[in-house]
Each structure stands twice: as structure tokens, then as C-alpha cells.
Image (cartoon, rainbow, N blue to C red):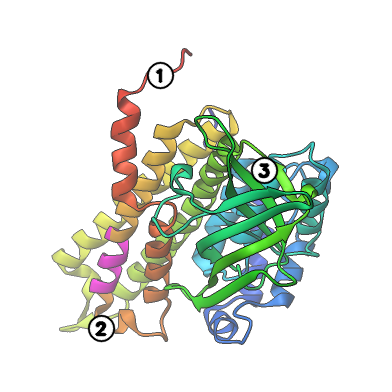
Amino acid sequence: MDFNFTAEQHLLRDSVSQYLQRNYAFEDRRKIVTSSLGWSRDVWQELGELGLHALAFPERRGGLGGSVVDMVAVGELFGAHLLVEPYAASVVLAGGVLAALPEHPEAGRRLERIASGEAIGALAHEEGQGTADPALIGTRARRTPQGYLLTGEKKLVLHGDGADTLVVSARLAGEPGDRDGLALFVVDTAGTGITATPFVTLDGRRAAHLRFDALEVGPDALLAEDAHDVIRDAVDGAIVALAAESVGAMGELLRTTAAYAFTREQFGVPIGTFQAVAHRLADMKIAYVKARATLLHTAALAEAGRAGTRDIAVLKAQTGRLGRLIGEAAIQTHGGVGMTDELPVGHLYKRILTIDAMFGPADHHLRRIGIAATEPQPAT
């Protein structure tokens, strides 16, 4: 396996980095977050012009045929600059599910609109249990002569209040089988039958709880009757993409903290020369290198089709644990000023904490590692 970015990926990173440095400075981002929308349509359009909306999707669906490593390459930059636009919600999550259903005409049509930037997608899956385990889904879909009625509630749907397209998981009522008919539907957000409770997440992003009150959808809204594998793969892909954001935020915290430590003086010398601070910086560096190495290793496994449950769990657990270590050390080094809104330090740490909480925190994935270790391993 090659753990280095290709020349093309370096060019992509350079283009995205230059754009963000020019147009997404921390002060620009603060204004965007406090706006009524909570993200910038201009920035979203310009990211599309860079090809990022279509990056991960197949060419026959209007995409660029990019890879997992391509997503990691740009994800680190998104994390370092604290991007709040709906990339994870629309492209990674909703788009990831739709891309896994290439033969379904409605999925293809919706995916093309997401890839072109015409529509914002969102995945409505979790129901307040703190993990994406399909066994915990209680939303029901009942067959009718006209299609289906969806009833249930989804929690923490990223950009759920502003999305054009919702991809919703639900159980087909009365369906036989061990998997109890866990299905996927695609829903327009316009119209009645959906009640949204919008809010702002810890890291400043927009999200909503969604309630479906016997929402009527047509027969074409059913994307898949047995969607366990599709949901699992989409969540695993999202974990890798979000881990890249977390590692990007860790790297920015390390850079910012080191610069501060060798600029801030006490007793006439930089505090970075104090043994305790120097050791803390060294611990931060080691933690960052570990997290990034785990990210690149897992991304390479995923691109080769060899990333299993244990690999994804290790990545999620490592980035969660090591991200907390780096964030706490950065705030300790900066002192009280590290938690002010005027500096990015606290915002970067909040982003790391939010990513850790999504799809199960580090402790949850450590338990998954223990379970995976007891399961039979596939022959290689």
C-alpha cells in the first residue's frame, strides 16, 4: 500500500487550500456561522466549481470518480478551516447512500442533483441512541395502495431543516426476516407530514430533529427493502471522511499552539522553552502523528476494499481519544484565552468533540473492537 498522496491529490489539496486561505479565514467563518442560514451559498457554489460536490461520485452519475483517499485529502483541509457548509451531510452521507444504489432511477436522479450542487441532501437515520446501529431504528413504513406511510422520529439530522432531499431509514411493517425489513426511502422536504425542530450543534453547525407523522410517499420513494449493508457502508465511509476533518483540526491545533508557545513570553522567555510546556507540545505532536497515520492506513485499506469493522472502529476510537488529548493540551497551553470565541482554539476542539460523538464515541468503538476480535476473520 502507498500511504502518500498522488501528484493529482497534491494539486487538488493545493487548489482547495488556496481557496480556503483566501476566502475562509477564521473571521469570515465567524460571520458565516452567525448568519441566518448558518453557512454560505456562495462558498458552497465555489466549492462545486472546484469539483468537490462531484468528487466522490461515479462519472456516469455526473461525478468525477474520486476515491476514499481523495475525500481524505480534502477533508483534512475542511477540518483545519472549520468548514460549516453541508459537505458531510449532502455529499458524504446522503450522497454516499444514493451512490450505493446505482441501478435505482430515483436514486440516480437525486444523486446527479447533489453532484451538480442543485440540491442539498441529508441522511435521516439515527434516533437518539448515540450510534448508527440499524438494530436501533424504530421508524416504521406501512404499505398503502398509493405507496407508503412513514411514522417516527429522527434525531440530529445534519442540515435536516434546510435539505431538499432526505434519505430516510425505516422498517417495513409486517415484513418477515431477521433484518425486519430495514428499508431506505427518499423524501422531498417540501410539503406536509414532516415536523422539523432546528438547532445549532456544539460546533456551530445546523441540524434538526425530524418527526414523520404518517408522511405519504409514492412507491418510487422506496430505494431498497434490505438496506443494512448500504447504511453500514455509508456510515463507515462517513466515519473515514469525518476522521479526516478531525485530524485536520488536530493539525491546526498543533500548529497554532506551537506558534503561541514560542511567541507568548513569561519571565522574559517564550513559554515553549519551559520543560512542562515543551513536553506537552511533544505529546501533542506524537498524538497527531498517531491519529494521522491511523487515518491514512484506514483510507488505504478502504480504497483497496479491505477495511473491515475492526479497522473503522480503530480509526474512530483513535481519533476520538487522541483528539481530546490534543484539544485539552492546546487549551491548557493557551490558558483562559483558548476558550474565547475570538480564537479558533476552542472552536477546533468543539469540532473534534462533535465528530467523536457522531456515530458512537470512542468508548463505543473500543467495545466494537473487542467484539470484532471474537468474530471469525475472513480468509485472505
Residue at 49% from the left image edge and 30% from the top image edge: 178
Q: Is residue 59 above or below residue 167?
A: above
Residue at 76% from the left image edge and 58% from the top image edge: 114
Q: Tell me the element at label 1.
A: loop
Mark with earlier residue (2, 3): 3
Q: Are marks 2 and 3 in contact (CB under 8 Å)?
A: no
Q: Nearer the viewer, residue 234 or 304?
A: 234
Mark with earlier residue (1, 2): 2
Q: What's the mark number on residue 268?
A: none
3D distance between C-alphas at marks 1 and 3? 35 Å
Which region shows up in magenta? 325-332
> x%, y% of residue 258?
33, 67
Q: What's the mark number on residue 7?
A: 3
3D distance between C-alphas at marks 1 and 2? 49 Å
Q: Nearer the viewer, residue 123 or 329?
A: 123
Per the image, the residue denoted by label 2 is 336
